[in-house]
Image (cartoon, rainbow, N blue to C red):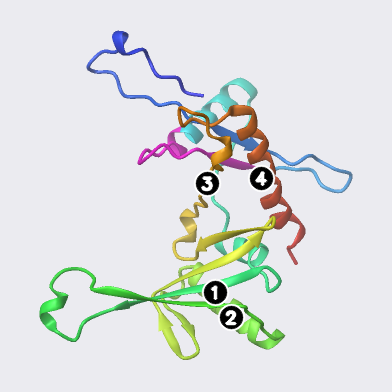
């Protein structure tokens, strides 16, 4: 954890620091698999980003102390889509169409409105699911900006999937910078608003296990 300096010792030239939590998860090796990949879970600190500077410093630390090369990358979009979005766990499609007015005066500034179409209780046969997945993978890979469904084109696509018995919403645009936000349950928060650390660790161990099961067990 990064700890802030006391207020009375801080100089005007000092950079503000804020405490945050970082959890690193590596699955255990077994008889068949030697694990070389793990997962980082970063705490969001308001508008502040901690991922870049933290991974840079960790790479230097592992190199200088252990002589190891640590690589930190986001998951390839196509790999992520194939592993996490499946016919048996997809719950909803949220398709967003940017709506423009026919009146030129309404289009002077950026944007006018949006139309959201929600499809739930999904049931696809094998052929239709294959077609839907092809379109999802094109969108997720940045190869095609529009998602086509029932001869309608949408500017943005989100999917809601069941992971570990809980619904997660994944925005399929800009997956190269994939960031999945996990909320902290209210019963973990203490009176001052900070999380109870033992309960937080237990909770995110459970969350990480849910993701790892999806990522590892369902690849074909």
Front: mark 2 or 4: 4
Number of the label disc, if any, that sits on residue 183:
3
Task: Label 4: state its secondary structure.
Answer: helix
First of labels 3, 4 by sequence position = 3
Gap between marks 3 and 2, in whole Å? 29 Å
Residue positioned 49% across, 38% down in the render: 43
First of labels 1, 4 by sequence position = 1
On screen, 104 above or below 71?
Answer: below
Q: Where's residue 109, x and y in %?
A: 15, 69
On screen, 69 above or below 210?
Answer: above
Choose between 80 and 119: the one closer to the eye. 119
Label 1 sits on residue: 136
Label 4 sits on residue: 208
Task: Label 2: state its secondary structure.
Answer: helix
- Taking the view exactly as shown, the residue that stands out farthest to the bottom is 151
Front: mark 3 or 4: 3
In which quadrant of the rendered view does residue 214 lie?
bottom right
First of labels 2, 4 by sequence position = 2
- Residues at badges 3 and 2 in contact (C-beta under 8 Å)? no
Using the rendered image of the protein, determine whether residue 43 is visible from the camera's viewpoint. Answer: yes
Front: mark 3 or 1: 3
Range covered by the magenta-colored residues: 38-53
Number of the label disc, if any, that sits on residue 132:
2
In which quadrant of the rendered view does residue 22 lie?
top right
- Residues at badges 3 and 1 in contact (C-beta under 8 Å)? no
């Amino acid at each position: 954890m990064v700890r802030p300096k006391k207020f009375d010792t801080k100089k005007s030239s000092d950079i503000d620091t804020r405490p945050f939590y970082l959890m690193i998860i590596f699955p255990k090796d077994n008889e068949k698999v030697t694990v070389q990949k793990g997962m980082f879970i970063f705490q969001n600190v308001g508008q502040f980003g901690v991922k870049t500077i933290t991974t840079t410093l960790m790479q230097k630390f592992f190199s200088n102390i252990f002589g190891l090369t640590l690589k930190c990358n986001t998951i390839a979009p196509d790999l992520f889509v194939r592993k996490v979005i499946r016919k048996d766990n997809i719950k909803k499609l949220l398709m967003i169409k940017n709506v423009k007015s026919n009146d030129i005066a309404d289009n002077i500034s950026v944007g006018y409105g949006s139309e959201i179409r929600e499809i739930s209780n999904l049931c696809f046969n094998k052929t239709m699911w294959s077609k839907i997945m092809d379109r999802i993978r094109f969108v997720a890979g940045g190869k095609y900006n529009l998602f086509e469904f029932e001869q309608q084109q949408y500017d943005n696509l989100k999917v809601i999937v069941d992971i570990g018995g809980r619904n997660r919403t994944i925005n399929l645009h800009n997956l190269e910078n994939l960031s999945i936000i996990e909320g902290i349950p209210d019963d973990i928060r203490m009176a001052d608003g900070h999380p109870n650390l033992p309960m937080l660790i237990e909770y995110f161990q459970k969350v990480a296990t849910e993701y790892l099961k999806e990522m590892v067990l369902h690849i074909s």
